[in-house]
Image (spheres, rainbow, N blue to C red):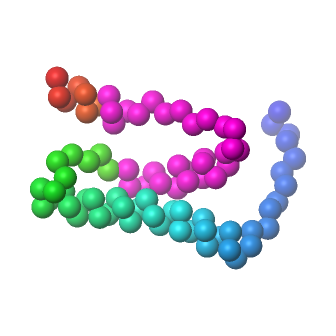
Amino acid sequence: NLNMPVREKKFTRNELLIDYCLLVLPRTIEEIILNLLPQGNISKWFSGIGQGASGVGVTKAMYFHDYFFTNAPQSRRHHKEKS
């Protein structure tokens, strides 16, 4: 139904801070790993910069009983490169 009612939610300062931390964490990890690549400490990494917000948003919208499936395109590409 395209005419679903929209309920606006007021977020508390604490909720916004938690969401911000959830967005910063994957980006920080990504930047650390990208800095380690040229040093040879990590052999392969498929960058996901710019995709973190969608993952955080989807998982925040999930309920406890929900499942999350992915087709993991990086994994398939990695297996093709190895063979």
Side (left or right) of 82 relative to 71? left
Side (left or right) of 45 relative to 23? left
User: At which x and y percent is residue 32?
Assistant: 29, 64
Residue at x 69%, y 44% (from the top left corner): 64
- Find out whether residue 61 is within the magenta segment: yes
Side (left or right) of 8 relative to 65? right
Residue at x 21%, y 46% (from the top left corner): 44
Residue at x 12%, y 56% (from the top left corner): 40
Residue 25 vs residue 9, the one in the foreground: 25
Quarter of the image holding residue 36? bottom left
**Range shown magenta:** 48-76
- Find out whether residue 54 is within the magenta segment: yes
Residue at x 75%, y 68% (from the top left corner): 11
Placement of 67 over or under 42, stated as above or below: above
Side (left or right) of 39 relative to 17? left
Name the image quarter holding the N terminus.
top right
User: At which x and y percent is residue 18?
Assistant: 61, 68
Quarter of the image holding residue 19? bottom right
Name the image quarter holding the C terminus.
top left
User: At which x and y percent is residue 56?
Assistant: 55, 54
User: At which x and y percent is residue 24?
Assistant: 47, 66
> Quick one: which residue is furthest to the top in this view?
83
Placement of 69 over or under 58, stated as above or below: above
> Quick one: which residue is furthest to the bottom in this view?
13
Instruction: State the count of labels.
Output: 0
